[in-house]
Image (cartoon, rainbow, N blue to C red):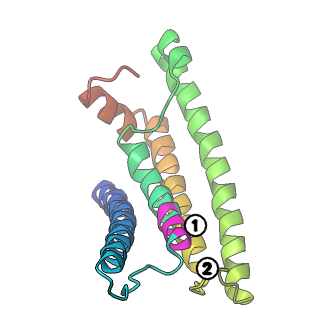
Amino acid sequence: MRLFLDRLYAAALILSALGFAAIAALVLFQVVGRLIDRFARLAGVSPPGLTVPSLAELGSFLFLGAVFLGLAGTFVRGGHVRVSLLTNALPAGAARVLSAVVAAIAAGLSTFATWSSWLQTADSWAFDSVSFGMLRIPLWLPQGVMTLGLALLTIALIDALVVLIRGGAPSYEVAEAGAGVEG
């Protein structure tokens, strides 16, 4: 199960990175297209008009997907900000209990966010909601990716909670210790 979860988190991180790369490629294409248009005007030629329709909207949807898909992988690799002043000051047993309580609360909040996001996605699907830009993108697509990212974060939080309850070190602590970061 551990290998499956680690691969799942890694796959989500790869998709997240691809989302950011797609944003960069679209923006680069738009910039190069504008330069080509400008040089064509300077040369007295009709500009070809190379543009990406609804670039801002596409970029925002890709950004949303990239951020939410990266949540779980970033969490398990110790990349999220954690304030551990209190847990460091407590005895090991009490720190473990507090960490488990925090993980349980975070998992509960993440479960609620996932459920709420799913309801919004289902409504967008049922009502055929589309974006307002030049490209009519079904809103369930970016909302579904956001829901998937939240679901993966929920799984990662429950995973950490189970590891804490069983007396092990959650993956974020292992990653922080390996990176030389104090918990």
**Residue 58 highlighted magenta (yes or no):** yes
Q: Quadrant of residue 19?
A: bottom left
Give percent across and percent down for residue 183.
41, 22
| Of residues 51 and 138, the one drawn nearer to the viewer in this rendering | 51
Q: Residue at x 40, y 39 (%)?
A: 79
**Residue 57 highlighted magenta (yes or no):** yes
- In primary-sequence order, the first of circles 2 and 1 is 2
Q: Residue at x 29, y 27 (%)?
A: 177
Give percent across and percent down for residue 152.
48, 59
Mark 1 surroundings within 10 Å by alpha-carbon count, few (fewer than 14), some (14 through 19), many (20 or more): many
Give the magenta part as a residue range. 56-63
| Of residues 133 and 5, the one drawn nearer to the viewer in this rendering | 133
Give percent across and percent down for residue 57.
56, 71
Q: CA distance from mark 2 to mark 1?
A: 10 Å
Amino acid bearing label 1: Thr
* Residue denoted by label 2: 140
Q: Is residue 66 visible?
A: yes
Front position among marks 2 and 1 = 2
Q: Is residue 89 above or below residue 16?
A: above
| Of residues 93 and 148, the one drawn nearer to the viewer in this rendering | 148
Give the structural element (helix, strand or loop) at label 1. helix
Q: Quadrant of residue 40?
A: bottom left
Give percent across and percent down for residue 124.
70, 81
**Mainly helix, strand or loop, the magenta region?**
helix
Q: Residue at x 67, y 80 (%)?
A: 132
* Residue denoted by label 1: 147
Amino acid bearing label 2: Trp
Q: Is residue 156 above or below residue 14?
A: above
Quarter occupied by the N terminus: bottom left
